[in-house]
Amino acid sequence: MRSIGVFALATSLVVLPAQADVNKEVPRSILTPDTVDTSIGPLTSTDGVPTGETAQRVYDYLDTMRGVDAFLKGMPAASVQALIKGNHKLGATQAHQVLIMDKLMDSKSLFLTGNTSTLYVLPSLDLKRDGPTVLEAPPGMLGAFNDAWFRYLEDIGPAGPDEGRGGKYLVLPPGYHGDIPDGYFVVHSKTYDVWAFMRASIAEGLEAAARTVREGLRIYPLSRMDNPPRMEFVSGSGVAFNTIHANDFSFFEHLNETIQKEPLEMLDPETRGLLASIGIEKGKPFAPDARMKRILTYAVAIANAAARSIVWYPRTAGTMKGIQMYPDTDSAWLMGWLDKNVFFDGKDGMTMNSDARVMFHYPYTAVTPAMAVTRAGAGSDYGIAYVDAQKQPFDGSKTYRLRIPTNPPARDFWALTLYDTQTRSMLRTSQRLPTVGTQTEGFKKNEDGSYDIYFGPKPPKGFENNWLETIPEKGWFVVLRIYGPLEPWIEKTWRPGEIELVK
C-alpha cells in the first residue's frame, strides 16, 4: 500500500497541459518525430510507437549490421578453419601427418601472402580428438602456435622457450586438469583446434632444411608417447589447394562449424551474443530462413567490401599513421601490423582496434609477437605496397618500376613477392615463384649499386631477371621482405623507392 501511495503522490505533482501542448515542457532531444528520413529509408511512428513497416525495416538493418560485424569479428576463426581444411584436403588429417613445402611454396597454392624464400611446415592439432598432444621441434625452427580464433599461444624457436635449440612442446586442451609430466614446454589452449606454423631457413640449401624437418619433427598424442605413430610428410609444393576463407554466405556456415566444435569459453559473452543474434549458437542448428539467408548474403558483401577498404585505404589518422612505414612522408609503403601490435589492443593494452584486426587477418596469417619485433640482424621485417606512388591501385596491363637504393640493409637477403588482389595469394603467372631479389639468379645491379625492379606484362629489355610478370585486367600488390634487417632499415634512414608508373 505504501508504494502505491508514493506513486499516487508523485503523479499528483505532475500538471498535464492540454493535449496539443503535452510535449511543450519535454526536451525535444528525447522525443521521436513521427517521420525521419534516414539512410535506410523513412522511419515513421505514431507518438513514438514505430509502425509495423518501420519495425521490419529496422530489424532488417539490425540483422544486416550484425551480419557485417560477425564477418569482421569472425574472420580470424574462419581463416584458421580454412587453413586446417586445406591440410585435410591434401591428406594431412592426423597430428602425425604434416604439410611441408619441401620445394617451397609457389603460386599454385591459395595461401594468404605466403613467401617463396623459406621452407614452410604447417601442422594442425585436434585436441578434442587426441587430447594433450606433443610437438617435438627440431633446432632452428621459427614459428608459433595459434588457437582456433587465431590468437597467439606460444612461440617455437628463438623467440620461444626452446630458444632455437629445439625441444618438446605439450599442447593441452581447454579445461585440462590431468597430470602434466616433466620435460615439456607446456602450452595451454582455449580451443581444441590449434594451428602451428613453422619456417626453416634454406641458407644451407633446401634439401638440408627439408631433411632437418623430416628427421627432427615429431607430433603425437601424449597418450601414445611410448609408441608414437610414424611421421608422414605431405608435400604442398606445386599443388593447387585452398586455405582461404569464403567471402559468400558459406562463410557463416564455416564459422558455425567452429562454434559447434569449440567450448563456450572460447569467446566472451558479447561476441557469443552477436553470433547468436544471427543464428549461430553452440548446441543449436544454424538454419536461417529465406529472409535471413538473403540478409546475411548482403552482409557478407558489405563486410567483404569493408575489409578490402580497410586494407587498401586505411582511413583514420591514428590507423594510417600507425600502419605507415614512413609517416613523415607520402610513401605508400605500409607495415603488416598497426603500431607493430599483434594483439590489436591499442597502446594501453585495453582498447581493441577492430580495424587493425581486420587489416591484418584479411590479407595475412600467423600471429606471434616475434614477427612484429625488429631486432638488428635477426628475424625478418616487411613492407607492403597496395597502391602506387600516386595512391592508385596497380593495373596489371601497365608497367611499373621500383628502385631499391644501394646497400639494402639485409644481413641475409631481401625479396619482393607479387600477390593477387582477389586471393591475396601469390599471383599466378608463367613465373612459378613470383619473387625477385638477392636470391634471384642473374639479378642485375645498377652501376651505383641500386636495383631497378619492373612489374608488367612483358620484361623491359636487359631487365628480364629483375622483372615480375603481371596480367592485364588483373590487380596486384607487392610485399618487400628483409631477412636479417639492419639498423638503416630499423631506423628508417634507408628507404625503398616508390613504385612508379612507367607506361
Image (cartoon, grey):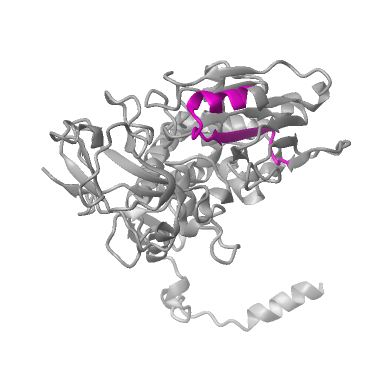
Give x and y (percent) for residue 117.
43, 34
Q: Is residue 489 left or right of residue 397?
A: right
In the figure, residue 472 lies in which quadrant?
A: top left
Q: Could you tell me which quadrant the N terminus lies in?
A: bottom right
Give x and y (percent) for residue 167.
72, 36
Decide: is 41 above or below 183.
below
Give x and y (percent) for residue 150.
58, 41
Residue visible at 18% across and 31% down in the picture: 457
Q: Could you tell me which quadrant the C terminus lies in?
A: top left
In the figure, residue 350 lies in which quadrant?
A: bottom right
Which residues are drawn in magenta?
Answer: 188-214
Task: Indicate yes or no whether the magenta region holds residue 198.
Answer: yes
Task: Indicate yes or no whether the magenta region holds residue 470.
Answer: no
User: Which residue is situated farthest in the left direction here?
Assistant: 503
Give x and y (percent) for residue 146.
61, 40
Residue visible at 35% across and 28% down in the picture: 433
User: Which residue is situated farthest in the right direction here?
Assistant: 179
Q: Taking the image as drawn, is residue 41 in sight?
A: no
Q: Nearer the viewer, residue 177 or 501?
A: 501
Residue visible at 36% across and 43% down in the picture: 479
Q: Nearer the viewer, residue 51 or 79?
A: 79
In the figure, residue 301 lies in which quadrant?
A: top left
